Image (cartoon, rainbow, N blue to C red):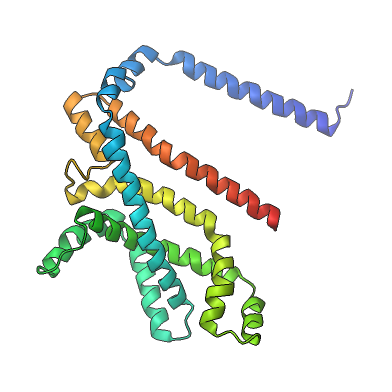
Amino acid sequence: MKLSRRRRQRIVRVAGYIVFALVIAGALGAADWGRLSEAFFRLDVARSMFPEAITVALRNTIVYTLLAFVFGLTLGLILALMRLSSILPYRWVATAYIELFRGLPALLVLFMVGYGVPLAFPDREIPGGVYGSVTVGLGLTAAAYMAETIRAGIQAVPKGQLEAARTLGMSHVRAMISIVLPQAFRIVIPPLTNEIILLTKDTSLVYVLGVTPATIELTKFAGDALNTRVNPTPLVVAGLLYLVITLPLSQVVRALERRASRER
């Protein structure tokens, strides 16, 4: 008997589920969970990390992320407008900045901000100490990516919107602020949210600035705990705390993308 196309597709799909389940079950059954638990899931080691893991390390990670994001978003918006400017030197400067900082590792930028700036300007310090250095170091790199994202959002707004605003008597600046930028930001919210997730993980590089117990972040905190207890459980705890930040943000991105799809 010849099977219909839909029935064949259903059989293939069910077979795929069965194969997938068998592979997972085989991997779970072959693993030595006793050794894994002893190595990565020591509850006594995890309990010893609290409450400092939450009150200090996690808090600092969130603060570093937010500060760098605000700095990067502000600078990225300026760079995006410069890239779209009719003034040629503005476009040159913005393009050079974006290409430079997209090509440099964030670790190198942090190092140069933390140690190069004090050497270049010995009489001046970045306000905020480590917090200020992290804000500038991570924000400079993030701004290069955000600038391109914002520029793409601005260019995605139909040109007729700007032309209609100009015919109503608005200046170019007023039309950009009131008409174009609100629509552009609505378009680029999902990729900007992804940038927050990337910044959250980039805070793991803050150790290069020589953090103190008061300014420590999750990865450095877990590394110190690992050296003290000689057990990788602190790394697992740090990973779970990163997920506490990033998973809700990922859900926000998906919700915004679904909403944008419905609106289109």
Residue 3, percent across and down?
Answer: 86, 27
Of residue 56 and residue 245, the one placed in the foreground of this image is 56
The residue that appears at 61% across and 70% down in the rendered structure is: 157
Query: Which residue is at the far right?
Result: 1
Above/below status of 69 relative to 148? above
Q: Is residue 103 visible?
A: no
Residue 182 lies in quadrant: bottom right
Residue 226, percent across and down?
Answer: 22, 29
Residue 116, percent across and down?
Answer: 16, 63
Left or right, 141 with reference to 109: right
* Quadrant containing the C terminus in the rendered view: bottom right
The residue that appears at 30% across and 25% down in the rendered structure is: 233
The residue that appears at 75% across and 25% down in the rendered structure is: 11
Of residue 227 and residue 170, the one placed in the foreground of this image is 170
Above/below status of 230 relative to 142? above
Residue 173, percent across and down?
Answer: 51, 81
